[in-house]
Image (spheres, grey):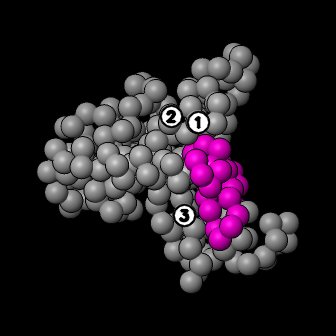
Amino acid sequence: MAVVDCWFDYSSPFAYLGTTQIERVATEADATVRFRPFLLGALFSAVGTPMIPLHSFPPPKRRHQELDLERWADFWGVPFRFTSTFPLRTVTPLRVTLLADCAPALVHRVMRAAWVDDEDVASPEVLARCLADVGLPVELVDRAGDARDALRAATDEAIAIGCPGAPSFVVGDQLYWGQDRLPFVKAALEGRPPGVAR
């Protein structure tokens, strides 16, 4: 069975949109998903990207980017609300996700907290509630430091394989950056060139 690695950070609204769709895409292609959390800020620092790309855009480009997020949410039929705590601090939720073996239910719950419910996912209380909502032990919040090395290693791997940002999707030796590349991801999972319709 084909596998797609979904590299993400909760700090990216585009990663939120991508995670709402990647399991559907994989299912349609008879494939499976592995969620791969990494620290986007550290990757940006390593590759020379502004720490908050949206803030580096001129006003017209920033307005279009924000409108694009809303259009994509409408296209996918998912709720979306730009967080009031941007930029998000995601080290702790990413570590907790690794301790929870990257459980898909937790990934979706934390994403929803950040990009639908406008909650601060760096808050231990918010994280504990997310864990409880999906049946995982809330004690993982207190143990977040245990995953320090795991998050560093995951981030180093994302940098090493050439992830330009989040979300990035990897199928075999092919990498696709951006939630708008999901049709290409599906084609790769089905073993056909991106430009060849099924």
Q: Residue at image x 68%, y 67%?
A: 173
The reply to whether the C-beta atoms of the residues labelled 1 and 2 are less than 8 Å apart is no
The reply to whether the C-beta atoms of the residues labelled 3 and 1 are less than 8 Å apart is no
Q: Nearer the viewer, mark 1 or mark 2?
A: 1
Q: Name the amino acid, label 3.
A: Asp
User: From mark 3 to mark 2, how far is it between C-alphas?
Assistant: 19 Å
Q: Quadrant of residue 45?
A: top right
> What is the tally of numbered marks visible in this picture?
3
* Residue 15 versus residue 171 in the image, above or below: above
User: From mark 1 to mark 2, how far is it between C-alphas?
Assistant: 9 Å
Q: Name the amino acid, label 2.
A: Gly
For marks 3 and 1 on the same chain, the one whose residue lies earlier in the sequence: 3
Magenta range? 159-183
Label 2 Cα neighbours within 10 Å, binned few <14 / some 14-19 / many ≥20: some
Label 3 Cα neighbours within 10 Å, binned few <14 / some 14-19 / many ≥20: some
Q: In the figure, is residue 188 to the left or right of 14? A: right
Q: Quadrant of the N terminus?
A: bottom right
The circle on residue 41 is 2
Q: Quadrant of the C terminus?
A: bottom right
Estimate the x, y position of residue 178 in percent, counting from the top left.
Answer: 65, 48
* Residue 1 versus residue 168 in the image, above or below: below
Q: Secondary structure at mark 2?
A: helix
Question: Is residue 75 visible in this depiction of the protein?
Answer: no
**Which residue corresponds to mark 3?**
5
Question: Is residue 151 visible in this depiction of the protein?
Answer: yes
The circle on residue 46 is 1
Label 1 Cα neighbours within 10 Å, binned few <14 / some 14-19 / many ≥20: few
For marks 1 and 2 on the same chain, the one whose residue lies earlier in the sequence: 2
* The furthest residue to the top: 59
In front of the other: 193 or 76:
193
